[in-house]
Amino acid sequence: PVEFLLGWRYTRAERRGGFLSFITLIAISGVALGMIALITILSIMNGFEIELRERLLGFSPHISIRADNGMITEWDALQARLGELPAVESVGAVIEREAMLTHHDQVQGVRLQGVDGASEPRSALVDEKITGAGTASLRPGGFQIILGEGLARSVQVALGDYVTLVSSQPVRTPAGLLPRLKRFEVVGILGAGVHEFDTAFAFIHIEDAAKLFRYGNAITSLQVRMDDPLKATTLKSIIGDLLRESKTAGNLQVYDWTDDNENLFKALKTEKIVMFVVLALAIAVAAFNLLSTLAMLVADKRGEIAVLRTLGLARRRIVLA
């Protein structure tokens, strides 16, 4: 096409205005670098968000059912009904409380989770990140514990060591209130790669947790894992309707993983928007320079354009050239 031939000719030809060519090169380079920076940074941030989401979903429940008063007593029938839902992969009973972890002179607060790894299949990511015994190896009455990597480092323990858990509920004795203590053996170290889990979480068997906190047959939450976590909002509404039909509707609340990590993902979304605006402004400045350079180039080529128009070349084809 003649437009291509004219464009190629003017690109290769020696120009009288060297300064104009230099400005054109700078403008084109600015637009190209701005686009490269925009695509690269947004790709990195999207990849970081996806990686963070996969790690969080690997260790966090997709949907959690908790009671207003902190204890769910009649949960067996509800667990069975939830397990029958088509989108549900597994439903596990959990006792989650805060406690103090001590080892020699080291003291650290911990979020303790009592789980039954034998009946609640954990994510494959969890098993890959645990050094030593996994949650399925925890024996009831064995008083074994799995610590996060950062937590184990802060209290200076390793596999095979013993730590003492101090419950927040004291024991009433004739001598007064005494703290409830229990010694646990460290059988696993969890390196999740997520700061919250590595520095604050510990896992024990659910029966040991019930004995430590005097829960009996009660639990604190039912944790649901799904085949597709992105459909958690839909399943949350289904479970909410199911609970409203039951007698315990006023006592139980349903939360999905977006509720538990709402502030984190809102911050990531805001950061992506801000970065997009900043980089888009940089591209706009470079594009403005390019347009001004093109305007100067057209003004410099008025004679050539007049010749082409005289020869019958349409205005649209000259613009394309």
Image (cartoon, helix red, strand yellow):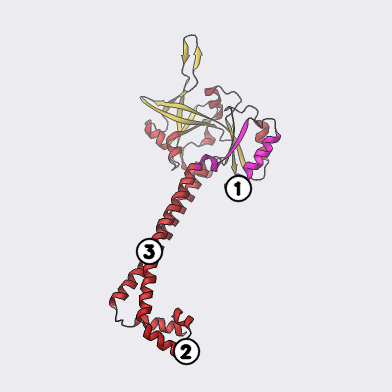
Label 2 sits on a secondary structure element that is loop
Instruction: Tell me, yes or no, whether the highlighted magenta stretch contains residue 256.
Output: yes
Q: Earlier in the sequence, mark 1 or mark 3?
A: 1
Q: Earlier in the sequence, mark 2 or mark 3?
A: 3
Above or below, 57 relative to 4: above
Q: Amino acid at mark 1?
A: Lys
Instruction: Tell me, yes or no, whether the highlighted magenta stretch contains residue 29.
Output: no
Q: Earlier in the sequence, mark 1 or mark 2?
A: 1
Q: Quadrant of the C terminus?
A: bottom left
Q: Position of residue 95 (x, y in %)?
A: 55, 30
Closest to the observer, 219 or 36: 36
- Between the C-alphas of marks 1 and 2, the distance is 62 Å
Q: Which residue is mark 3?
A: 285
> Which of pointers 1 and 3 indicates the residue nearer the eye?
3
Stretch in magenta: 233-262
Q: Which mark is residue 312?
A: 2
Q: Amino acid at mark 2?
A: Gly
